[in-house]
Amino acid sequence: MWSYWVNILDAVWQSAVIFFMAYLSYQNESFNDVSSFGFSIIFSMIVTSLIHVVLQTSRIDWSLISSTAFSFLVFLGFTLVFDDVCVVCIPGESPYQVSYQALRQGRFWFTNLLTIVTAMLPRFTVKCIYNMMRNPLN
């Protein structure tokens, strides 16, 4: 039961950090930047989830790294193709070139780097403390 509530609190923390940091970064911008706001949230969610998976494993090997990299590349590939091909796929809004524009913005990279580090910091800290107490190096 303890593990369940710790994971729930961690999920709430990560969700709040990802949303509010992106929101604060893009709150006073035009429509294109509102679309970049959405892409920034998705990008942070995917990268945070993949880092979370790596942190939760007890052994990191080539299969974990390759599957994590493959997952990220599939996400990025699909996003870039969809944004380039879909001009009016969604009625009322067009995601055309949103990811291309976002990936060129320094604010996008700074926001995502800061967001991912902040979202993962509690999990990483607890994991480090747990590993030090459970397996101290003698």
Image (cartoon, helix red, strand yellow):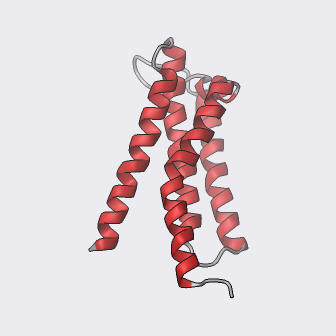
Task: Give the residue displayed 57% in from the left and 57% down from the top.
Answer: 50
Instruction: Name the residue at the front extreme.
Output: 138
Residue 55 in picture, x, y percent from top left: 57, 66
| Quadrant location of the N terminus in the rendered image | bottom left
Does the rendering let one see residue 80?
A: yes
Q: Quadrant of residue 33?
A: top right
Residue 47 in picture, x, y percent from top left: 58, 49
Is residue 9 toward the left or the right of residue 45 in the image? left
Residue 104 in picture, x, y percent from top left: 70, 25
Does the rendering let one see residue 88?
A: no
Establish if 121 lies above or below 27: below
Count up the numbered dots. Answer: 0
Establish if 4 lies above or below 27: below
Establish if 52 lies above or below 138: above
Instruction: Name the residue at the bottom extreme.
Output: 138
Instruction: Name the residue at the left extreme.
Output: 1
Q: Nearer the viewer, residue 89 or 59?
A: 59
Q: Quadrant of residue 70?
A: bottom right
Task: Give the residue displayed 65% in from the left and 69% down from the top.
Answer: 64
Q: Nearer the viewer, residue 3 or 31?
A: 3
| Quadrant location of the C terminus in the rendered image | bottom right
Task: Give the residue displayed 54% in from the left and 25% down from the top.
Answer: 36
Residue 27 in picture, x, y percent from top left: 45, 19
Task: Give the residue displayed 59% in from the left and 84% down from the top.
Answer: 135
Establish if 78 lies above or below 30: below
Instruction: Name the residue at the top extreme.
Output: 30
Q: Nearer the viewer, residue 121 or 26?
A: 121
